[in-house]
Amino acid sequence: MPSLYVPLTGLESSSEALSVTSNNLANLNTIGFKSQRALFGDLFYQQVGTAGDGDQTQIGLGATVESVDSQFTEGSIQASGVPTDVAIQGDGFFVTQEGGAITWDGIADFFGRPELKDQRFADPNQRLLNGHELDAIVLDATKDRTMAEMFKTASEQYRMLFGIVQTPEDLATCAQLEARGFYEDVEHPVIGRIRVPFRLWNMSDAGPLCRRAAPLLGQHTAEVLGQLGCSAAEIATLRERGVICGDGGA
């Protein structure tokens, strides 16, 4: 009954997205609130035929809210009068730690704050005990620096373990991933040419090979069942009983 269920999934998804929008509006004056957005996706696919190379052709049916993301962008900073309130300042989040080829004194030099070399921050226990002071110093030291500049300086000048907490949009446009050929353009039988994560690591003597795009839903079900010992008749029976559907789909 796709004529009933497909529109119903759209209504449910729209209802959830409307709730997200309502929550954003209700918190316009809430200190520290970060707006959210609903991201949609296809619920399932229906096979509509077979391409010339034998791959199945499918179209999306139904919709669902795949995720609700928070927007961690810098807003207008206002004083709340509450000493424990915090605000996001700058263009993102980062994480750093001792290790690699840098000492704590080197980290202090990276942040440009000699007070980080004080006895109160001399070891992990002291830094834990004086965490509020440490946070205040680091926040003040980084408020006018960008993530890109800090990452470049940390890695090239200090050999420092420093990572940027990136959003999906940041990853898609990341200059470092682009330079190392992390993404690959592939032809998808449903949505056309897309960029996908590909080179997780690079090896000098064994280059990566992209054999084909990710399989469609149930594309190789019949093939896998055949390798497991199911006969063509048994696969046909499974299809008739609704265990698998379509021409080899699942």
Image (cartoon, grey):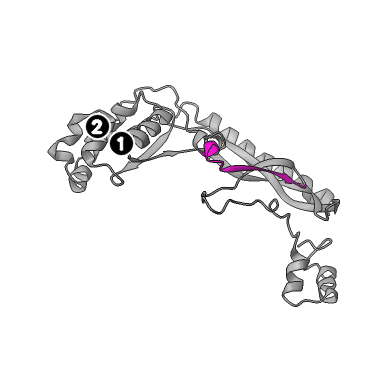
User: Tag 1's secondary structure?
Assistant: loop
Q: Position of residue 26 (x, y in %)?
A: 53, 31
Q: Which of 113 and 15 is in front in this view?
A: 113
Does 20 appear above or below 227? above
Residue 111 x/y as whole percent: 28, 31
Say which of marks 2 and 1 sits in front.
1
95 vs 71, nearest the viewer: 95
Type of amino acid under label 1: Tyr
Residue found 22% across the figure and 29% down from its top: 113
Please tell me how crowded label 1 is: few (under 14), some (14-19), or many (20+) other residues with Cα within 10 Å.
some
- Is 135 one of the magenta-colored residues? no
Rendered location of residue 218, percent (x, y): 74, 60
Residue at 48% across / 38% down in the picture?
166
Q: Which residue is drawn at 80% across and 54% down?
A: 55
What's the CA distance linking mark 2 and mark 1? 9 Å
- Residue holding disc 1: 158
Q: Where 147 falls versus 101 (above or below)?
A: above
Mark 2–mark 1 contact, CB under 8 Å?
yes
Q: Label 2: which residue?
A: 109
Which segment did they paint magenta? 177-189
Q: Does residue 14 appear anywhere in the picture?
A: yes
